[in-house]
Image (cartoon, rainbow, N blue to C red):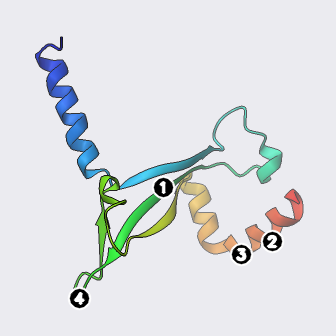
């Protein structure tokens, strides 16, 4: 038997599931102290990959995000994996200007 606040919490969770727009497909935490920094030449970040479902719509919107619970029943559904990166501000500033050079460096050092 659920008490009042447990019932309310369960209702909120169910309502949240109705609007859930993505699934987390992977998480890579390079901030973790156990992460081997040799794999990334010392680079640190948190990467979260999410899968989103959408379908094309007419102008002006162009596309509509589809809640996960409706993926199976939606005609014309397209899925897309997005990567969300969380990095230190200092690294972001470096990446803005030196990203191509960094990729070459990382590929040479780490492969």
Q: CA distance from mark 1 to mark 4?
A: 26 Å
Left or right position of 54 against 42: left
Look at the numbered disc 3 and give the secondary structure of its residue: helix
Residue furthest toward the left? 4
Q: Are marks 1 and 4 in contact (CB under 8 Å)?
A: no
Q: Quarter of the image for the C terminus: give it.
A: bottom right
Image x and y of residue 99, in percent: 67, 71
Q: Nearer the viewer, residue 2 or 96?
A: 2
Q: CA distance from mark 2 to mark 1?
A: 27 Å
Q: CA distance from mark 3 to mark 1?
A: 25 Å
Look at the numbered disc 2 and give the secondary structure of its residue: helix
Q: CA distance from mark 3 to mark 2?
A: 6 Å
Q: Which residue has dot 1 on it?
A: 50
Q: CA distance from mark 4 to mark 3?
A: 36 Å
Left or right position of 59 against 8: right
Q: Which residue has dot 4 on it?
A: 59
- Residue drawn 83% across the image and 46% down it: 38
Q: Are marks 4 and 3 in contact (CB under 8 Å)?
A: no
Q: Which residue has dot 3 on it?
A: 100
Circle 1 Cα neighbour tier, 10 Å, few/some/many (<14 / 14–19 / ≥20): some
The quarter holding residue 34 reads top right
Q: CA distance from mark 2 to mark 4?
A: 41 Å
Look at the numbered disc 1 and give the secondary structure of its residue: strand
Q: Which residue has dot 2 on it?
A: 104
């Amino acid at each position: 038997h659920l008490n009042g606040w447990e019932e309310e919490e369960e209702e909120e969770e169910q309502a949240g599931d109705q609007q859930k727009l993505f699934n987390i497909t992977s998480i890579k935490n390079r901030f973790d102290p156990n992460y081997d920094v040799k794999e990334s030449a010392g680079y640190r970040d948190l990467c979260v990959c999410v899968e989103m479902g959408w379908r094309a719509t007419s102008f002006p919107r162009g596309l509509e995000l589809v809640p996960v619970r409706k993926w199976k029943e939606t005609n014309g559904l397209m899925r897309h994996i997005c990567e969300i990166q969380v990095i230190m501000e200092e690294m972001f500033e470096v990446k803005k200007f030196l990203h191509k050079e960094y990729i070459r460096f990382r590929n040479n050092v780490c492969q």
